[in-house]
Image (cartoon, helix red, strand yellow):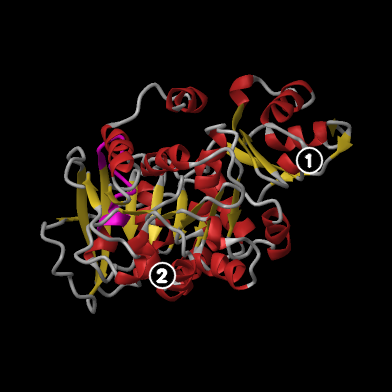
């Protein structure tokens, strides 16, 4: 079964962490998996979930709780790509409760969602909790940090027939809260087994100048590299974004106050190369499917060492090398948890506005629910849009929409060529995604 899943995922072999998790899960009822972001943890726990599922059993068998909508969607996507024959559904805030309730009338074998939304469905008895025998608490420490303790505690209390619990985290917790019900767990710790990463730490002190102006200078100096700008608060994200808009610099933002569609679109444009710069809160520090980052800029320093580690962990992943910039004003305190002495950053030059990337994003107002797939879009854009293969980039198909990366110098012509075209016999709105 596992070999077929790997074939479906186009993976040749499991890594050491994934193999250890499968082996331990077969022997233990309760499991704690400690492994850093980007290490394949999702597949690491989904394979034990799959091995625990019974084809002849009805109802939700496994419940997976996660701290963010994006992580829930990512897990659902990976499980579907595994092509197991088992149904999975996803529930999260910002998604239609009516659609979710309808999906639960024909319950999936695996249900994944955020604690608040799953608690809503439990309270309204929208699915039978008595059939759930396995619980996964993914990125558990982040769920606690986001304030989901009460919802998680309520949900777990209602799950009377659990016989297997798995808790995953990217940080080692000194004590596991009693409400999880985890007892005498087998701990798999791969936090110390990761390759040595090289994150160059640099410091820019702000004296007599606005911090925002200094950030803009840094972005101009290094703006041709993929960059995450971290803030502690949403209003700081919006303030930086407004400055970059005024300067005409393409970028996107990502925080918990945004509508789900806007958050998804921001990540898609970042993944497909339409934007190099993403301004965000700690929401983007873990559990998101985003590419290798070259630069991390701390516009506001995090309050904890864990947050600092996870932010910087977005760079120096596969390439094992990256750079993190600290921007400190005279009133900021240098955190005691930063042990290394950062190199001072020089901004004495004159820096021009970075050029936009070579890619732009085409929005297509139809998706999986309309029976449209990637090949339909590829065929239409190559044949009717007159694109060469190298002028078409990453395509992502969601339930009700799709997005295609198209070379920036071609996209407006493509829109004109395909505006009257049909996909699967239907005329569908297509436009440049601003």
Which residue: 53% across, 43% down? 356
**9, 334: nearer the viewer:** 9
Circle 2 residues within 10 Å: few <14, some 14–19, many ≥20: few
**431, 59: nearer the viewer:** 59
Magenta stretch containing residue 311, yes or no? yes
Q: Secondary structure at mark 2?
A: loop
Q: Is residue 17 left or right of residue 123?
A: left
In the rendered image, the vertical position of residue 81 relative to residue 57, given as above or below:
above
What's the CA distance linking mark 1 and mark 2? 35 Å
Type of secondary structure dominating the magenta stretch: loop
Corner quadrant of residue 148: bottom left
In the rendered image, the vertical position of residue 361 relative to residue 204, given as above or below:
above
| Image x and y of residue 49, in percent | 44, 43
**Residue 403 visible in rendering:** yes
Which residue: 43% across, 41% down? 291
Task: Please give the label number shown on residue 146.
Answer: 2
For label 1, the residue is 370
**Residue lying furthest bottom in this view?**
331
In the rendered image, the vertical position of residue 394 relative to residue 159, given as above or below:
above
Q: Secondary structure at mark 1?
A: helix
In the rendered image, the vertical position of residue 291 relative to residue 68, given as above or below:
above
Which residue: 61% across, 47% down? 58
């Amino acid at each position: 079964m596992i070999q077929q899943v790997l074939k479906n995922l186009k993976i040749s072999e499991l890594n050491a962490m994934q193999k250890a998790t499968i082996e331990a899960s077969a022997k233990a009822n309760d499991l704690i998996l400690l492994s850093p972001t980007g290490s394949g943890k999702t597949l690491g726990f989904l394979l034990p979930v799959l091995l625990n599922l019974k084809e002849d059993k009805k109802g939700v068998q496994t419940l997976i709780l996660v701290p963010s909508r994006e992580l829930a969607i990512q897990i659902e996507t990976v499980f579907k790509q595994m092509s197991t024959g088992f149904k999975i559904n996803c529930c999260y805030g910002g998604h239609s409760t009516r659609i979710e309730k309808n999906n639960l009338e024909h319950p999936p074998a695996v249900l994944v969602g955020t604690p608040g939304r799953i608690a809503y469905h439990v309270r309204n008895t929208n699915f039978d909790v008595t059939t759930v025998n396995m619980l996964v608490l993914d990125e558990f420490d982040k769920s606690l940090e986001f304030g989901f303790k009460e919802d998680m505690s309520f949900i777990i209390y209602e799950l009377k027939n659990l016989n297997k619990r798995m808790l995953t985290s990217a940080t080692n917790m000194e004590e596991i809260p009693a409400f999880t019900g985890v007892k005498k767990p087998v701990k798999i710790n791969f936090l110390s087994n990761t390759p040595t990463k090289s994150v160059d730490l640099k410091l820019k002190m702000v004296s007599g100048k606005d911090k925002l102006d200094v950030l803009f200078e840094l972005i101009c100096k290094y703006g041709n590299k993929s960059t995450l700008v971290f803030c502690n608060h949403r209003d700081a994200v919006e303030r930086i974004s407004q400055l970059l808009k005024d300067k005409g610099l393409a970028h996107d933002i990502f925080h918990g106050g945004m509508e789900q569609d806007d958050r998804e679109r921001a990540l898609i444009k970042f993944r497909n190369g339409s934007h190099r710069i993403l301004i965000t809160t700690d929401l983007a520090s873990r559990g998101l499917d985003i590419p290798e980052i070259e630069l991390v800029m701390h516009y506001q320093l995090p309050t904890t060492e864990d947050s600092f580690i996870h932010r910087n962990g977005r760079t120096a992943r596969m390439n094992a090398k990256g750079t993190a910039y600290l921007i400190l004003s005279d009133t900021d305190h240098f955190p005691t948890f930063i042990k290394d002495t950062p190199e001072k950053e020089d901004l004495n030059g004159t820096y021009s506005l970075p050029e936009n990337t070579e890619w732009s994003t085409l929005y297509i107002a139809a998706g999986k629910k309309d029976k449209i797939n990637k090949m339909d879009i590829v065929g239409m854009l190559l044949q009717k849009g007159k694109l060469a293969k190298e002028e078409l980039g990453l395509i992502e198909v969601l339930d009700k929409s799709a997005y295609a990366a198209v070379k920036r110098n071609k996209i407006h012509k493509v829109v004109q060529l395909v505006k009257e075209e049909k996909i699967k016999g239907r005329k569908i709105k297509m436009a440049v995604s601003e």
